[in-house]
Image: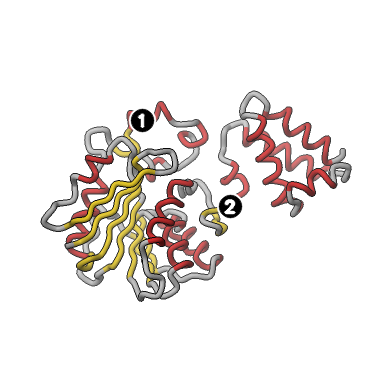
Amino acid sequence: MQLKSLHNFFQNGLIGYYPKEEINAFFYRICEQHFDYKRIDVHLKSETLISAETFEYFETLISRLLTYEPIQYILGTTSFFGLEFKVDDNVLIPRPETEELVAWILKQTDSSQALKILDIGTGSGCIAISLAKHLPNAMVYALDVSPAALKIAQHNAQHNAVQLKCIEADILEWTTAAHAFDIIVSNPPYVREREKERMAPNVLEHEPHLALFVENDNPLIFYKAIVGLSKINLKKEGFVYFEINEYLGEDTKALFSSTDFDDLQLKTDIFGKHRMIRATKR
């Protein structure tokens, strides 16, 4: 079998489950990892003969994609803010809106400063590592309740040549007087249980619910805890940054007491949705 025939086989195996453009994107991404072929190489080398082992590998990938398992988990890696991250079903797959959050922080931060930064609910470490990569003088702490997630974050830190100080803790219970941070950032669980019906099966059936969902009657539980922590552990004129539920922007903003915080900014993403907030400690 030639590569072009494998491409047709792959498309036919997934048609009806995914749009054709997405199927092709999967194929090119797999070829880049498996053969080290760029997209143009797939076309230039379309008559390359494929081994039986490679064909079986692609058959396995098709069977996994038919269950809507995310391609990032299947291949074990994803890109975020120009960096490569290991991911599996212990951590969320980083989203483009989270890249916007990182970009916002970096735009408003002096990279020459010796800052202390805390990323709460770090998961794969995508926020913490991206900040550490672009703020070389910063000391970055990464907190998560999941030891499996922290193991992945440490791997990703080493892979991207940055240092992280990992903390295994539940933010709903964690207190410390040992740290004063310049920046506290978090993308905590914020999807209400009632919003599950809107979610794609690749997310709902494969990504960790611990990192996604909150109860309908207390959707801001993690934000409340982090705001409370920030009152104690954020330096004067330090910043809190959140990624937020697009439907709860004003509710999240209301958590910040005017006696403790000012200069609240509710920011939209590229789709015009309220997805980020920043507050300054008085």
Where residue 128 sits, quadrant-wise, is bottom left
Residue at 26%, 33% in the rendered image: 216
Mark 1 lies on a secondary structure that is: helix
Q: Is residue 180 above or below residue 222?
A: below
| Nearest to the observer: residue 281 or residue 32 | 281
Q: Which residue is mark 1?
A: 195
Q: Is residue 35 above or below residue 195?
A: below
Where residue 1 is drawn, which disc sits there? none
- Taking the image as shown, residue 50 lies to the left or right of residue 129, namely right
Q: Amino acid at mark 2?
A: Thr
Q: Is residue 26 above or below residue 109?
A: above
The residue sitting at the top extreme is 16
Where residue 127 sits, quadrant-wise, is bottom left
Q: Which residue is mark 2?
A: 77
Q: Earlier in the sequence, mark 1 or mark 2?
A: 2
| Nearest to the observer: residue 157 or residue 244 | 244
Q: Position of residue 52 (x, y in %)?
A: 83, 42
| Nearest to the observer: residue 176 or residue 39 | 39
Where residue 117 sits, quadrant-wise, is bottom left
Q: Amino acid at mark 1?
A: Glu
Q: Label 1 crowding class (10 Å Cα cut-off): few <14, some 14-19, many 20+?
A: few
Q: Label 2 crowding class (10 Å Cα cut-off): few <14, some 14-19, many 20+?
A: some
Number of callouts in the render?
A: 2
